[in-house]
Image (cartoon, rainbow, N blue to C red):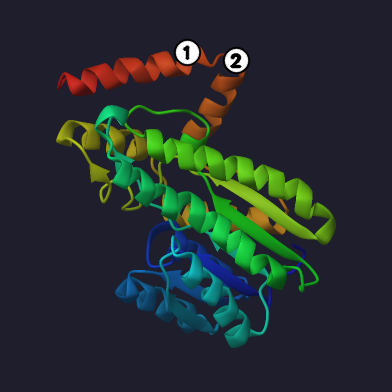
Amino acid sequence: MKKLQDRVAVVTGAASGIGRATAIALAKEGCALALADVNEVGLEETAAAVRALGRKATTHRVDVADKDRMRRFADEVQEAHGAVHVLVNNAGVTVTAPFEEHSLEDWEWIVGINFWGVVYGCKFFLPYLKQADEAHIVNLSSLFGLIGVPAQSSYCATKFAVRGLSEALWVELKDLNIGVTAVHPGGVRTNIAKSARTEGAALKSFGIDLIERFSVSPERCARQIVQAIKTNKMRLLVTRETHFIDVAKRFSNVLPQRFLLAGYRRQLQGKP
């Protein structure tokens, strides 16, 4: 996008972490914000930070897995702001459990938020994005959208799906002047790993260690997201480990998995 000043941006999962940081970063660029989350306290805190920068902010309690609510949310934003230029599908959750012990109910929960939430966002906001002279969609994938990680089967599945969806939309929407960016963060200091639904303390520790070992701040991630919007970047790799895995997978699909296997075995055996 050539211009962000006086644009309207929508951010889901805006109550904390990357969502909050991205909302604030977009406000600093001159955007008005429509903020969505189920955490109303955190949502109001983000809105206050946006308003402190002199930008308009509306808050919307939204479960992104709820199709009808997401349809109404898109209409609410259009009514409140008169336009939509940027959509950031950021809301996400994770489950840490071996596939065998991973309940189907938890599978349905994570797929609803991480994947269907992105699909609903793209689907229901697209008619409004098409009305803009230029627009952009940002979909949060993950490092785990590049590599399959043990005890993260459902999270990986959803993030690989977001990656595929985003790449397909990049082609379909190019001639409509709508850019699409798939974001692949690695370790970012958010609460997603700590708040994960988990089967076993050792596995939770394993997941947190993988995500946070080389973590960066949400603000740093947000700055890169804003830059990706400005440059219409199709894929954004945020952290060092994401770049490393991306390169490693090009040379060998097996070696990175063997490395994960060794770490997984050590963690289950209680070894450092």
Q: Is residue 128 visible?
A: yes
The three-letter code of the residue at mark 1 reads Leu
Which quadrant of the structure image shows residue 18? bottom left
* As drawn, 47 above or below 159: below
Q: Residue 80 vs residue 37: left or right?
A: right
Locate the C terminus by quadrant: top left
The answer to whether the residue labelled 2 contacts the one labelled 1, judged by CB atoms less than 8 Å apart, is yes
* As drawn, 103 above or below 176: above
Say which residue appears at 14% left-offset and 22% top-offset: 270
Residue 228: image location, x then y, percent: 65, 53
The three-letter code of the residue at mark 2 reads Phe
Give the SS element for disc 1: helix
* As drawn, 223 above or below 203: below
Q: Residue 92 vs residue 272: left or right?
A: right
| Foreground pick, 237 / 84 | 84
- Residue furthest to the right in view is 175
Say which residue appears at 48% left-offset and 77% top-offset: 50
Say which residue appears at 22% left-offset and 35% top-offset: 205
Which quadrant of the structure image shows residue 5? bottom right
Residue 104: image location, x then y, percent: 32, 41
Mark seen at residue 255: 1
Q: Which residue is mark 2?
A: 251
**How far is disc 2 from disc 1 in space, using C-alphas?**
9 Å
Residue 255: image location, x then y, percent: 47, 13
Give the SS element for disc 2: helix
